[in-house]
Image: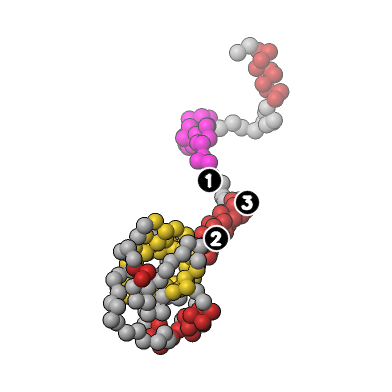
């Protein structure tokens, strides 16, 4: 170190010359030196804080939940209003008995029918008649009913002469169409009996 540099350093020292200096070999100087040497000079990097969820995230989540709820409601509504079509209901127009006698049609007997619906004949192909269901009086989810019968079944006692495009009221028990007036063209009189047996339908 040059004299000039030593002179400049003395000018920068704020302590007056008369203040005594403590030798580096003293006990207190050693403690200070150890404290200085053990103090890290480079700051340890801190783990970045995880940003908290901002209000717009919460808003987006809320909108998503509402959208799912609305979508579920729409699906449920469409399912109930449009009646998701089940498989066609298959019925048989079984053989009749020319000697059988029929009881008068009444709501009292009609209410016990397993199947009762109103539908329109949309196709007749040989022995197969297809009806589109317009109203169920009993529980049912099929939109189409297929009735299969042997040739000439319309001539059987109480039989039905199905005509394409015509509307019919049909009942069935154990998969067999009922005759004797419990199935037939949709007339105001027969409709009134059906509505009396199945109120609210």
Check residue 50 in the rendering and tell me which mark sits there, or answer none.
1
Residue 20: quarter of image: top right
Looking at the image, residue 67 sits to the left or right of residue 197; the answer is: right
SS under mark 2: helix
**Disc 3 residue crowd, few under 14, some 14–19, many 20+, Cα 10 Å:** few
Q: CA distance from mark 2 to mark 3?
A: 26 Å
Residue in the image at 31% along x and 64% along y: 150
Residue in the image at 68% along x and 17% along y: 7
Residue in the image at 46% along x and 64% along y: 163
Specify whether residue 188 is painted magenta: no
Query: In the image, which is nearer the foreground, mark 1 or mark 2?
Result: 2
x, y (%) of residue 88? 39, 61
x, y (%) of residue 35? 49, 37
x, y (%) of residue 106? 42, 86
Can residue 103 be seen in this snapshot?
Answer: yes
Specify whether residue 36 is painted magenta: yes
Residue pointed to by mark 2: 74
- Compare residues 45 and 11 and report the one nearer the observer: 45
Magenta highlight range = 23-49
SS under mark 3: helix
Check residue 56 in the rendering and tell me which mark sits there, or answer none.
3
């Amino acid at each position: 170190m040059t004299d000039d540099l030593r002179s400049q350093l003395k000018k920068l020292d704020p302590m007056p010359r008369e203040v005594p200096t403590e030798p580096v070999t003293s006990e207190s100087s050693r403690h200070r030196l150890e404290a200085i040497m053990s103090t890290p000079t480079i700051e340890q990097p801190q783990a970045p804080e995880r940003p908290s969820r901002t209000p717009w995230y919460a808003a987006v989540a809320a909108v998503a939940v509402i959208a799912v709820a609305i979508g579920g409601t729409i699906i449920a509504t469409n399912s109930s209003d449009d009646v998701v079509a089940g498989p066609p209901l298959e019925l048989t127009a079984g053989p009749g008995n020319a000697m059988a006698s029929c009881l008068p049609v009444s709501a009292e007997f009609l209410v016990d029918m397993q199947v009762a619906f109103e539908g329109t004949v949309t196709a007749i192909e040989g022995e197969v008649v297809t009806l589109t269901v317009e109203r169920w009086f009993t529980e049912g989810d099929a939109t189409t009913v297929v009735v299969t019968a042997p040739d000439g079944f319309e001539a059987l006692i109480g039989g039905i002469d199905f005509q394409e495009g015509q509307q019919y009221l049909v009942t069935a028990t154990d998969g067999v169409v009922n005759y004797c007036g419990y199935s037939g063209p949709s007339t105001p009189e027969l409709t009134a009996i059906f509505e009396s047996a199945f109120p609210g339908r």
